[in-house]
Image (tube, coloured by chain):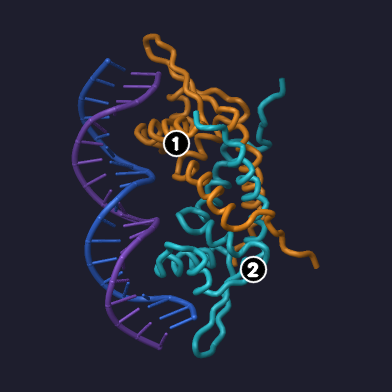
Chain colours: A cyan, B orange, C purple, D blue
Amino acid sequence: MNEPPRPSYTPDTAASGVEHALRLLEGRWKLLILFHLFGGQVQRYSELSRLIPGISEKMLAQQLRQLEADGLVHRTVYPQVPPKVEYRLTEWGQALCPALDALLGWAEQRPLAA
Amino acid sequence: MNEPPRPSYTPDTAASGVEHALRLLEGRWKLLILFHLFGGQVQRYSELSRLIPGISEKMLAQQLRQLEADGLVHRTVYPQVPPKVEYRLTEWGQALCPALDALLGWAEQRPLAA
DNA sequence: CAGTATCCCAGACGATACTG
DNA sequence: CAGTATCGTCTGGGATACTG
């Protein structure tokens, strides 16, 4: 039999690191937003609003601001009328893709309901 | 230059999958608990309570029940006095380890404060 | 030892209206 | 178009006390 996977880090150090990281992704909407920006996609505010049904304008704006403040998303404002704002991932934001891919793989391994 | 990583899945399918998976890990404590069970570790309630400073008994019990209901943690009750209950990860729970490892790697890549 | 029960609060989230 | 402002609700989580 094979041993269960053992993390290379210690629980204490890892906990603080991942916990902090997970904080940045918390909430109902952030992952959804990020998914629509993966692969270098550039989206406008209204486009994201359309792509994510059910999100309110308040939440979309709020979550985008937080993602921006946390360094995951880059916001570009074009000073024109009507206004135009584009969102894209930062490099660090893009780097999240493999991790979420792994998480998705895990989700798919889920055994049928116990 | 290299292209940004492009997920193999579409945002729509992936979003529902990862979103659902992330739901199981939501909250302030679940990751901490899981970390202390990785590598096949078996812990008692009181031990977890000691290992995770700041968690209230209510939250520890509540989160453990949810992890159990979600199929991540296995709970063993020894019918004796005083009571003894042990917690360990299920196979699926152990399978989460690489994904969190990836997430930790991402967290460490974080650029210095913008 | 391993929990439950109860009360309480802050913040997450939603709906709607308004604005540069 | 891309947001803010305001209000109300719901739930995650903390503190404390009690129990089989």
Spot occupied by residue D3 in the image (x, y as percentages of width and height): 43, 76
- In the image, residue A82 lies at what x, y percent? 49, 88
Q: According to the image, label 1 marks what residue?
A: B53
The crowd level at tag 1 (other Cα within 10 Å; few <14, some 14-19, many 20+) is few
At mark 1, the secondary structure is loop
Instruction: Out of B27 and B55, give the one closest to the viewer.
Output: B27
Q: Quadrant of the C terminus of chain B?
A: bottom right
Q: How many marks?
A: 2
User: As drawn, is B63 to the left or to the right of B34?
Assistant: left
Looking at numbered disc 1 in the image, what kind of residue is underneath it?
Answer: Pro
Question: For the point 55% across and 28% down, which residue is it?
Answer: B89
Q: Chain of mark 1?
A: B
Q: Which mark is residue A41?
A: 2
Question: Residue lying furthest bottom in this view?
Answer: A81
In the rendered image, the residue lying farthest to the top is: B80
Q: Residue at x 47, y 25 (%)?
A: B47
Q: Quadrant of the N terminus of chain B?
A: bottom right
Nearer the observer, A14 or B33: B33
Q: Are marks 2 and 1 in contact (CB under 8 Å)?
A: no
Work out whether disc 2 and disc 1 sit on a shared chain.
Answer: no
Label drawn at residue A13: none
> In whole angstroms, how far apart are the C-alphas of marks 2 and 1?
42 Å
Q: The numbered mark 2 sits on a residue in which chain? A: A
Residue B61 position, x and y percent, is 39, 31
Q: Is residue A48 above or below residue A20?
A: below
Nearest the eye: A50 or A56: A50
Q: What residue is drawn where x is 50% and y is 90%?
A: A81
Dot 2 amino acid type: Gln
